[in-house]
Image: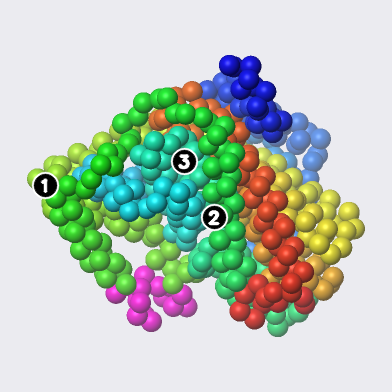
Amino acid sequence: MVKQEKKKKGLFNKFLDGIEYVGNKLPHPVSLFAIFAVVVVIVSALAAKAGVHVNFEKFVDGELVKETVHAVSLLTPDGIRKIFTSAVTNFTSFAPLGTVLVAMLGVGVAEGSGLIGAMLRKLVLSTPARLITAVVVFAGIMSNVASDAGYVVLVPLGAVIFASYGRHPLAGLAAAFAGVSGGFSANLIFGSTDALLSGLTQPAAQMIDPSYTVDIAANWYFLAASTVLITIVGTLVTEKIVEPRLGEYKGKSSKTIDVDRVSAEESRGLKFALIGLIAFIAVIAALVAPANGILRNPETGSIIKESAFMGGIVPIIALMFLIPGVAYGIGAGTIKGDKDIANFAAKSMSSMGSYIVLAFVSAQFVTYFTWSNLGTILAVNGAEFLKAVGLTGLPLMFGFILVAAFINLFVGSASAKWAIMAPIFVPMFMRLGYSPELTQVAYRIGDSTTNIISPLMSYFAIVIAFAQSYDEDTGIGTLISTMLPFSMVFLLSWALFFAAWFLLGLPLGPGAGLFY
């Protein structure tokens, strides 16, 4: 029987199995990130001794600045002192840590009171089983408008939803992660990333044309259409490749819900929760909607760019779960007093122990890599390589997408990469007759599709921690082999979609064409 199953396995599945096998033969993720950190320290010393450096121009506060970056050794006396004295701040300033813990305070209360279970039960009972994968992927894509909250909220919920349907929870986790991170640039509406990138594309374009402006909605049409594409592709990859490969889930987890019915107490609680949510949204709207709203940027009036609304999106998300969670608990009778609320929040924090350990080590690794300047050196050399190849037309654009995807494995921040790449590629492509908006959208395809397979991606560690709650043997090999089909198919299908859009001559956004 086993031999017959092996015969049915295709070459691609064997390839993924090999990646998983090798990856999981590596040490525990905590040990592995510690090893990565040591390797970075050693490589930084070797690169610095060899005099590795790059010269480039990048934007700083809207101005083009010439910069020379040298590899920095972390094995010098100063480097060793920095490693010891900054260990705590590396951890406390690690971006995902605050996002995860603050958001989990609200999510923990919503989960403890029973709100999330009742909502999921309602979702499961009202959504046809054939559509649930698409719903999870689509929700993940749409979540990126709320900054990084999707990693904390939707990725674990995807696992719970699939488990409640009797499907493999890791397939649900993968589908949500693919939507949140692999489809990071796609969305039906624009958000903070659009503002950040257009703010870097515009001065790059003005190096050629001082009067050129790049609007925040410059890629809106293309990315809205891409939302449909990524939802369909993500659904197909989940159901045709990832889930069959994972097989039947034989583990045990308390993170499932009974889908038989919604009780009268739960229905009452859901009504209370809806009232609480509406009241909360009304308060936030009152702080945002007026032209002089408190949560807008006080200087520009923007809701998106450098506003308190976007800067405070994590506590807003936490309150969006906390307030309806408390309201649900009162309505359903699961919250009798303030002690229950505090206990629910504390319980959610106690479940984050393994993640906190992993985050500490991961924070050191990511920070050492940043200090060493190795990521910047790789990014600049990758850009220079593409310039030297001499391609034109769609092959040039495909090459650019691939370079952006490769660099994204080593430099996670979309804006940090674009600050370096925009001054190189936007003027270069404008001279070839291509619009800055086209260059920006090609960059965003590459920047999104390899997020889900890069251990340097800030939230990679927390996704492993979520997965280990269903399978304690999950390691980096498991996660990468599970996500690699999404990454490969997203990259291929999105690039082909880009080519079709280009050949049809469709606008990328309001007033944003393909050619300069």
Residue 302 spot, x, y in % from top left? 46, 75
Q: Is residue 292 left or right of residue 70?
A: left
Q: Nearer the viewer, residue 145 or 481?
A: 481
2 vs 3, front mark? 2
Amino acid on which disc 1 is placed: Gly
Q: Identify the residue position indicated by label 1 in the image.
A: 333
Tell me which residue sits at (34%, 59%) in the image. 316
Tell me which residue sits at (66%, 47%) in the image. 489
Amino acid on which disc 3 is placed: Leu
Q: Nearer the viewer, residue 167 or 177?
A: 167
- The image's mark for residue 231 is 2
Q: Quadrant of the N terminus?
A: top right
Give the magenta part as a residue range: 286-302
Q: Identify the residue position indicated by label 3 in the image.
A: 173
* Mark 2 to mark 1 CA distance (whole Å): 38 Å
Q: Where on the picture, by quarter, is residue 232?
A: bottom right
Does the magenta-highlighted stretch encompass residue 142? no
Q: Earlier in the sequence, mark 3 or mark 1?
A: 3
* Mark 2 to mark 3 CA distance (whole Å): 15 Å
Q: Helix, strand, or loop for circle 1?
A: loop
* Count of numbered circles in the view: 3
CB within 8 Å, label 2 to label 1:
no
Tell me which residue sits at (38%, 60%) in the image. 312
Residue 158 spot, x, y in % from top left? 42, 44
Does the magenta-highlighted stretch encompass residue 296? yes
